[in-house]
Image (tube, grey):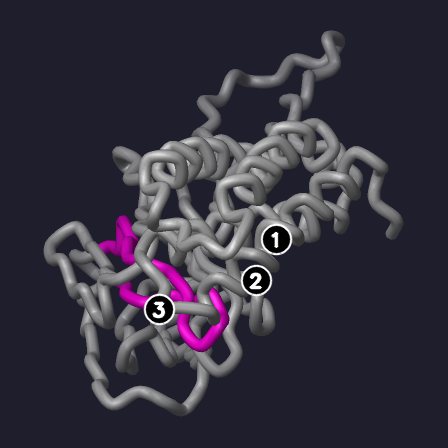
Amino acid sequence: MKMEPVTENAMAAVSAALDIATFNEELHQSSSLEDDLLIELTWLKWFLIDGQRTPEGRQRAEIWSPAIERLAQRAVTLQSGWVDVSSNPFGIADLLTNLSNLRDKLQLLVTSASSPAPKDPDLPISSVKIPKQIKKPVRENVKVAAWGGPGGKQWQFKFDGTMKQITIVNGEVIDSLHFTSLKSDGSFKTLKVGGCGGYKTSKINIDGTVEKLVQISGTYGFYTHYVVIRSITFRTTLNTYGPYGSSRGAPFSSAMHRGGKIVGLHGRAGQFVDAIGVFYRL
């Protein structure tokens, strides 16, 4: 679907900034500032592209495109010429702060849009006497947008019961994740995402009767020209498992809600685990 002109302008600016950032990375050994800039610009490009899937997403992209375009143009200006961006650390650092703040705002918008809208309660017909009943509040699942890169294929794993085991295979990045949950009927549900690489395997055994998964955190960043999950940590009501992988990259962390728990995971994966997000039950 064709983008709105204002969104096309933002996409062109982000693409230009990414081209320069990628060229600078290949021209000389990249710095942490350059890596972070590539990560933030890639996330904005994903936001603009992914938003075209729905009318609401296109509207969000159109509204925020002017701000995205301004920051992307600033990135182009700071990177212009045959100059290492690390030679202007304060300009790049300020830009990264603005890009990070914008990403946080957009992340909240994407998360809110993924939440199901509350339904109006059914009203009883006045002529019919219905005994009053105390209705239990419906606990809804909220999908939190994934952190990481746009590569790979989409995946999701809803526990449909209790999480029993997570297997992490990693080297410098998270190569694969293997999930096992115990369904209410006593059968097991499994899913493996990612590739066949990695040289270290770790297994987390979770006693779902007393232990609930409440948070994931980690880092994501560039590896062989792709933004992927570089490290991950799983936190339950009883223990913290990890971190697994390399801590280099931009940090991420899912919010913790009092009384809430994670009831599923989703993201993107191919040769590596490209992105990961959560389903919360509040």
Looking at the rendered structure, the kind of residue marked 3 is Gln
- Asked whether disc 2 touches disc 1, contact meaning CB atoms under 8 Å apart, the reply is yes
User: In x, y percent, where is residue 49?
Assistant: 70, 52
User: In x, y percent, where is residue 267?
Assistant: 50, 63
| Residue lying furthest right | 2
| Residue underneath mark 1 | 46
Image-based side of 138 in relation to 53, left or right: left
Mark 2 Cα shell of 10 Å, populated few (<14), some (14-19), many (≥20): many
- Mark yes or no: residue 184 visible: no
Mark 1 element type: helix
The mark that comes first in sequence, 3 or 1, is 3
- Mark yes or no: residue 202 visible: yes
- Residues drawn in magenta: 212-232
| Residue name at image x 33 percent, y 35 percent | 90
Which of 51 and 186 lies nearest the eye of the viewer? Answer: 51
| Residue underneath mark 3 | 29
The mark that comes first in sequence, 2 or 1, is 1
